[in-house]
Image (spheres, rainbow, N blue to C red):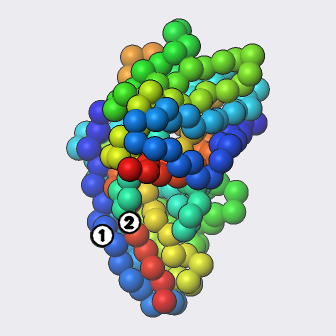
Amino acid sequence: AQSVTQLGSHVSVSEGALVLLRCNYSSSVPPYLFWYVQYPNQGLQLLLKYTTGATLVKGINGFEAEFKKSETSFHLTKPSAHMSDAAEYFCAVTAYSSASKIIFGSGTRLSIRP
Amino acid sequence: SAVISQKPSRDICQRGTSLTIQCQVDSQVTMMFWYRQQPGQSLTLIATANQGSEATYESGFVIDKFPISRPNLTFSTLTVSNMSPEDSSIYLCSVEIENGSSYEQYFGPGTRLTVT
């Protein structure tokens, strides 16, 4: 069985500050891990993914995430927040052997203060 | 990647009625899915839409309430039947695309349903 826990339903940072959104997962098999972003009144957009190989993955819009197996974490970061980053972010996990069923975390709403 | 469109983008419906949501993809895909996102909640998988056979439903979802069609590899519909206010949600379809040795899921823009 797999699960995802996102710590913090709402995160607020100042423009230009570091963004850190936390995600911990549980998986009995090697996981695929994803971060999706949902802008207001829009669908989901894939930010980045980890499958195998390099544990630090870079995505769109300057975001990156690091897969830490020992900590079962896949935290999302961005060095400098921009107003346009305000959105809902979802961490998700699926089984390495089958990408058919994705389990989503509860989401973290990111607000950016001017 | 894949470009996915959904119709309608939003609707307001009366309780007891049914709404059919369409999902169109710009390329042939094997796997299509339907998700529900209740207000302020995360996404929950409703079912996998199988081409040429009955959909595979997740626990808590039944065919009578959410009938699904998948007539070909680029199109699917989800019907929300006998609606109640609790069905007010965003309904999203997604497709799975093979990308090298891994897979990615792409999501449609969603259909925002309000039931009064």
Locate the N terminus of chain B by quadrant: top left
Along the line of sight, the residue nearer the viewer: B85 or B50: B85
In this view of the protein, can residue B86 be seen by the observer? yes
Give the residue displayed 59% in from the left and 29% down from the top: A75
Q: Position of residue A102 (x, y in %)?
A: 57, 40
Name which residue lies at 50% across and 35% down.
A19
Q: Nearer the viewer, residue A23 or B106?
A: A23
Q: Residue furthest top?
A: A53
Q: Distance of mark 1 from mark 2, alpha carbons?
A: 6 Å
Image location (x, y in percent) of residue A103 = 62, 42
Q: Secondary structure at mark 2?
A: strand
Identify the residue at image location x=49%, y=32%: A18
Q: What amino acid type is highlighted by mark number 1? A: Pro
- In terms of secondary structure, where does tag 1 sit? loop
Q: Position of residue B15 (x, y in %)?
A: 51, 90
Q: Residues within 10 Å of mark 2 (few under 14, many from 20)?
A: many
Is the residue at mark 1 from the same chain as the one at mark 2?
A: yes
Dividing the picture into quarters, in which one does residue B86 lie?
Answer: bottom right
Snapshot quadrant of residue B42? bottom right
Q: Categorize mark 1 by other alpha carbons within 10 Å: few (<14), some (14-19), many (20+).
A: some
Report the disc number at residue A28.
none
Q: Which residue is mark 2?
A: B111
Residue at image position (36%, 62%) is A41
Query: Circle 1 sits on which residue?
Result: B8
A67 lies above or below A35:
above
Whether residue A88 can be seen here: no
Host chain of mark 2: B
Residue A36 at x, y = what percent? 46, 40
What's the amino acid at mark 2?
A: Thr
Cβ–Cβ under 8 Å for marks 1 and 2: yes
| Number of residue marks | 2
Of the image marks 1 and 2, the number of the one nearer the N terminus = 1
